[in-house]
Amino acid sequence: MLEIAERDILNSLKQDNPWWDAGFEHPFVEFTRTRAYFARFCELSLNWDVRRSVILMGPRRVGKTVMLRQLVAHAIADGMEPSCILFASIDTPLYSGMPLTRLLDLFEKQTGHDAKSRRLVIFDEIQYLKDWEVHLKVLTDRYPNTRFIASGSAAAALRLKSYESGAGRFTDFLLPPLTFAEFLDFLGLEDDLISPEPSGQTLRYRVRDITRLNGAFIDYLNFGGYPEAVLNPEIQRNVGRYLGRDIIDKVLLRDLPSLYGIQDVPELNRLFTTIAYHSGQEISLDGLAQSSGVAKNTIAKYLEYLEAAFLIVRVRRVDDSGRTFQRMRHFKAYLTNPSMRAALFSPLNDGDEAMGPMAETAIFSQWFHSEAMGDLYYARWKSGRQTREVDLVKLNPANMRPAWAYEVKWSDRFVDRPEELEGLVEFAQKNWDSSMPVGATTKTVTRETRVAGITIKHFPCASHCYQIGRNVIEGRPA
């Protein structure tokens, strides 16, 4: 078999690592803006007290490679010798099938640094190397003073291999799509539209202009999950072309089939498209099997794959008493970012029927960033001949009792007709506790109403979405 010349590999490495040149002043960074998660990522990646490699994972186009470049710039600014930093993108054709040890040997040969000194080694798109987790585990043990950072867009592959082989040696760091708070910050709108108001542990916010905030919220639903789209008007004008194909198609047509050996890719694609169109609606495996003609076991696997790839998240159901079910026969499936719906179908406008479900999807997508996501449910039960539902219920993990409950609405009508929130009122009565907040979002109005002895707090959906994202990012209760 013909081998690639060593000088060609070294030339490629030098191009990816321009800071090795003594005359180079600053590492190249595509965006000067950093994600809200950057400081936390830097602290974890440059922690020399713990011998662990960091696995940066997340969906496509959320800014992982940019954040890695910014990490290099931060390390150099913090005093690290540039010759002790390696950045290698494993999807480079010249590196195809090359062991990580080979790249490390060439790195040492080219820069002549002390391999026992502190080093930062970054392998981007590592899922393109077969058995990467075995290679990385060996290197992590062999070089205690080297911090290895691996990343990739195939979140499903990274998560699977990291869990199976990296126990005790790898630490996962998930970079999700932009929160609504990050979106406003990227556009320079946050200070214009929001002002903070301290209130105990939880920081509350006052909206300066709800009309402008709602306009920005609709933009967020359409393209706000991805930094590149937020900063590029051309992508915003054609979300389907630039984001749909790159983010969704590559995962469905390449990442998942290659990882799990899926044969019927169109079948998987149809399932995801159906879920995306009906994001936030209740699903049952029996119903999906009957409507699609696909076996329940196959559908169950597909759902696991889509969730592992960070395309959807499933939310479990509780009854009117807040009790969970042993088997997840019914559940809701949400897109992890509402922008994917616009990429698949068409952008949303204020009066569209899908605004309600996508607003609900956006609210849930802020919680995806929080460890509290595992405590979130929806409630659905039979009340006589009627079916009642509450969109969002949080259970207290200590006693598994409802901590709060609210409905997500993109309308002000329920402020004047709170009695129409029948499911919310019935659920609150059944689980009444004077300390349990009960609420419903609106489009523009902030107010309290009282129905059948239950106080309902009404608050604008967009401001609530912002508050969750901002408080979660900064580690405060949402």
Image (cartoon, rainbow, N blue to C red):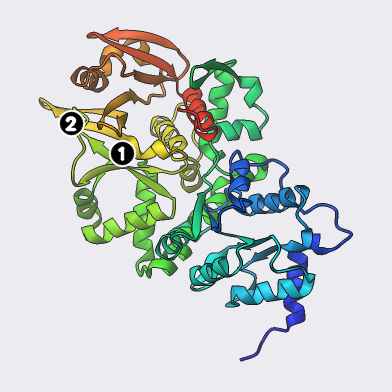
Up-down relation of residue 168 to residue 419 (above or below): below
Marks 1/2: CA–CA distance: 15 Å
Which residue is at 78% across, 63% downward? 83
Nearest the eye: 44 or 474: 44
Up-down relation of residue 436 to residue 52 (above or below): above
Quadrant for the N terminus in the image: bottom right
Dot 2 amino acid type: Trp
Left or right for 453, reference 210: left
Dot 1 amino acid type: Gln
- Residue at the outermost bottom position: 1
Which residue is at 23% across, 52% downward? 291
How far across and down, in percent of the image, does residue 319 sit?
19, 32
Packing grade of label 1 (10 A; few <14, some 14-19, many >=20) is some
Q: Secondary structure at mark 2?
A: strand
Q: What residue did someone put label 2 on?
A: 381
For residue 318, which quarter of the picture? top left
- Counting the numbered discs, the total is 2
Left or right for 125, reference 477: right
How far across and down, in percent of the image, does residue 407 sit?
34, 24
Q: What residue did someone put label 1 on?
A: 281
Quadrant for the C terminus in the image: top left
How far across and down, in percent of the image, does residue 423 sit?
23, 23
Which residue is at 25% across, 38% downward? 317
How far across and down, in percent of the image, does residue 243 sit?
55, 50
Nearest the eye: 115 or 160: 115
